[in-house]
Image (tube, rainbow, N blue to C red):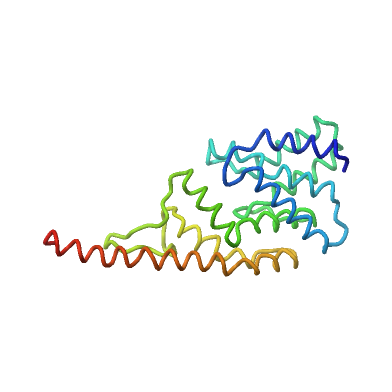
Amino acid sequence: MTSHVYQLLEEYMLSCMGDSAHDKEHVYRVLYSALEIAGEEPDVDYDVLICACLLHDIGRGEQFENPSLCHAQVGSEKAYRFLREQGFAEDFAARVRHCILAHRYRNNNVPETVEARILFDADKLDVTGAIGIARTLFYKGRVSEPLYSVDSQGRVQDGTEDEKPSFFQEYKYKLEDIYSHFYTKRGAEMARARRQAAADYYENLLAEVRPVYEKGRQALAKQVGA
């Protein structure tokens, strides 16, 4: 890939980014992780991989405006149209489209090519460890979702049985189990190295907030005669 082509793709990516949890730095981290993973995978088309990494989240704006949309679906079609308009071959544009379409965790589209599997793993790496916690908190704040839910008895829920969205619910639904969903050996290794940092944060936060409610409600009951 020439520097001119890279700059063309990068500029289009930058024009589409606006979500603090899925900003340009997320894109660069995904790209850099993908290149590390690709170093241990055979027969990688680096042009397809770099292009797919740069453009994988260009549909985020549409999904944020309309949550019924899937950013992977929207982004894959946007990328395909952009690439064709810029004169890229149909086969190249279609391969990039597949990578983007299949990169989402909550998705039934299985990554079928080595480039798609690498992008999937590199993107999932950015949901692991400390960076995954930070990005999740960023996103939950932006969409006004709470850290945790409290049941009718005033007990802080750990997220396991939560029906309403929260940080704890997201951790239990996605962040805790994502480590078994990697396609590449190197991606899985990189994820495992980060796992404990995320688990420690969740456990520490839960250990801090639960006693506050338990002791606080008892103290309040004494003061108000409940």
Front in this rendered view, residue 77 or 203: 203
Relative to 2, 51 lies left or right: left
Relative to 95, 65 lies left or right: left
* Residue 87 location (% of width, % of height): 85, 32
Residue under the image location 62 percent in, 66 percent down:
194
Front in this rendered view, residue 47 or 28: 28
Q: Quadrant of the C terminus?
A: bottom left
Residue 84 occupies which quadrant of the picture? Answer: top right
Residue 20 lies, with reference to residue 173, above or below; the image says: above
Q: Quadrant of the N terminus?
A: top right
Front in this rendered view, residue 171 or 72: 171
Residue under the image location 75 percent in, 64 percent down:
184
Relative to 31, 71 lies left or right: left
Q: Residue furthest top?
A: 85
Residue 179 lies, with reference to residue 12, above or below; the image says: below
Residue under the image location 79 percent in, 54 percent down:
115
Residue under the image location 28 percent in, 67 percent down:
214
Relative to 27, 4 lies left or right: right
Residue 43 lies, with reference to residue 8, above or below; the image says: below
Q: How many marks can you see?
A: 0
* Residue 200 location (% of width, % of height): 51, 68
* Residue 10 location (% of width, % of height): 75, 38
Residue 181 occupies which quadrant of the picture? Answer: bottom right
